[in-house]
Amino acid sequence: MSLDWLTSPEAWIALASLTAIEIVLGIDNVVFISVLVSKLPKEEADRARKIGLALALIFRIILLFFLSWLIGLTQPVIEFAGLSLSWRDIVLVAGGLFLLVKATREVHAEVEGGHQSAATAAEGAFTWVVLQVIIIDLVFSVDSIITAIGMAQQIEVMIIAVIIAVGVMYLSSGPVSAFIAKHPTTKMLALSFLMLIGVALIADGMGFHIPRAYIYFSMAFAAGVEIFNVIASRNRNQKKHAPAKAPAKKSNRKRAVGN
């Protein structure tokens, strides 16, 4: 690999821009992994999170070495009723449907209060979580790399941007997972995000692009409101369980009687 790009201002600008885009596109992945691992014991959850993000990094780097193949994925392979679908579109639609089905089932379980038995939850739960992470990692990796193609000419710049972005995802996924596990109400919000992302992926695959800025703004606004709700709920609980103040003692001092 050539290191000539180190002296190129354009390459550094491309690196900064591409890193920012990869971080933003990684938000979806972080939310999905955080929701999935929230059902596992802490030790297994941390291990599944690390495996999921490691796979995300591996998939992205591998796909970078197949740029010509990835560009070919944008060529139409199916045409019907005036609609042209490429392999990228098919992957996005399939991934969006997967997210919708997964999020809907999770919402149903939360609303109905259905829980797996201990035996069922223990049997293959970790493997099933990792398998789902692999599926969605593939979807987000293809979308992320194809979206980023054209921003940088050097593959070294692309690889560094991907490594930095996945590093940021790793640092942020821990607090996000812990927050969801600690505050169960936020899980419903995260599942709603996944449904929104699923709809956006399907729309993109069908040729109707929904600007990501709209989606991420709505997610950030809803998350901000939920954070205020969590803080308000915590303050109410603290006041409710705070020890009652003892009543002020009355003064027993007798008034002096004048002689």
Image (tube, rainbow, N blue to C red):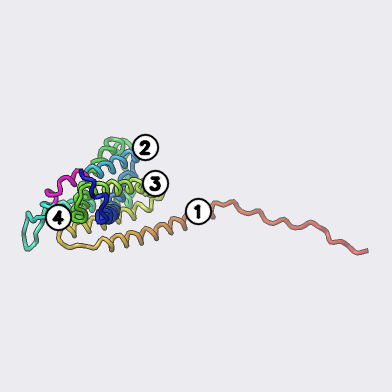
* Count of number-bearing discs: 4
Q: Which residue is mark 2?
A: 43
Mark 1: few, some, or many residues within 10 Å (few <14, many ≥20)?
Answer: few
Element type where label 3 sits in the image: helix
First in sequence, mark 2 or 4: give its number. 2
Mark closer to the observer (4, 3): 4
Looking at the image, which is closer to me, 34 or 229? 34
How packed mark 4 is, by other alpha carbons closer than 10 Å (few <14, some 14-19, many 20 or more), is many
Q: Residues within 10 Å of mark 2 (few under 14, many from 20)?
A: few
Q: Secondary structure at mark 1?
A: helix
Residue 154 circle label: none
The disc, 4 or 3, on the residue closer to the chain's N-terminal end is 4
Q: Closer to the camera: disc 1 or disc 2? A: 2
Disc 4 versus disc 3: distance between alpha carbons? Answer: 34 Å
Q: Are marks 1 and 3 in contact (CB under 8 Å)?
A: no
Front of the two marks 1 and 3: 3
Is 106 one of the magenta-colored residues?
no
